Image (cartoon, rainbow, N blue to C red):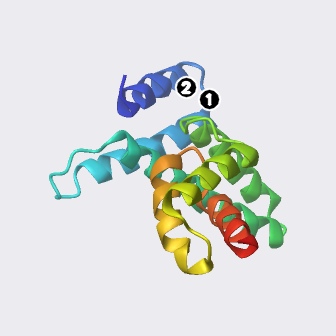
């Protein structure tokens, strides 16, 4: 079942359950999918593209949530938090920092990376291997920590 089909099925369930928050979140995902499919590039959406899109949506809402909390707008912050929870459900299981560190160590061993000059090479391979399973900030901080030790 494709992501689009899963979203459509879940939208129907949310409508039947009269879950307005979930329905709003799913409509946002469906809208992004539709925009990506009809962007004129003629390129087919891959699963990796869908994951990146959902990660971007979650990140955007997380940034809004942080702003609303700083501005003491709890009503808007709650709305963003609910959307983050609903949209995040479509992301693959996130890896623990220990598991990410193990994978990064393997990549550094393969590439022979030892200094910050190798950061781009390690990050590129790490993003490919961990795509969707780990946050980019987390990957970058672990890579920096490992390369600064070396």
Image marks 2 and 1: residues in contact by CB distance under 8 Å: yes
From what the image shows, is residue 84 above or below residue 56? above
Mark 1 surroundings: few (<14), some (14-19) or many (≥20) residues within 10 A: few
- In primary-sequence order, the first of circles 2 and 1 is 2
The residue at which mark 2 appears reads as 14
- The front one of 95 and 63 is 95
Tell me which corner region of the image, top left, top right, bottom left or bottom right, holds residue 24: top right
Q: Position of residue 87 (x, y in %)?
A: 57, 42
In-image side of 150 versus 56 (left or right): right
Residue 19: mark: 1
Q: Nearer the viewer, residue 57 or 130?
A: 130
User: What residue is rendered at 36% in x and 45% in y?
Assistant: 33
- On screen, residue 141 versus residue 24, left or right, reads right
State the SS at label 1: loop
Residue 67 image-quadrant placement = bottom right
Question: Which residue is most to the bottom?
Answer: 117
Question: Residue 112 location, x and y as percent?
Answer: 54, 64
Query: Residue drawn at (47%, 58%), measured in percent from left and top?
Result: 125
SS of the residue at dot 2?
helix
């Amino acid at each position: 079942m494709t992501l689009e089909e899963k979203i459509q099925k879940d939208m129907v369930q949310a409508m039947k359950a009269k879950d307005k928050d979930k329905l709003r979140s799913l409509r946002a995902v469906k809208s992004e999918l539709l925009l990506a499919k009809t962007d004129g590039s003629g390129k087919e959406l891959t699963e990796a593209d869908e994951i990146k899109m959902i990660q971007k949506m979650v990140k955007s809402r997380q940034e809004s949530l942080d702003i609303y909390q700083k501005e003491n707008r709890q009503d808007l912050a709650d709305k963003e938090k609910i959307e983050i929870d609903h949209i995040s459900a479509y992301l693959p299981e996130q890896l623990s920092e220990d598991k990410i560190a193990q994978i990064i160590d393997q990549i550094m061993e393969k590439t022979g990376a030892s200094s910050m000059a190798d950061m781009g090479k390690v990050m590129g391979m790490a993003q490919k291997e961990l795509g969707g399973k780990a946050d980019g900030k987390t990957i970058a901080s672990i890579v920096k920590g490992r390369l600064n030790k070396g």
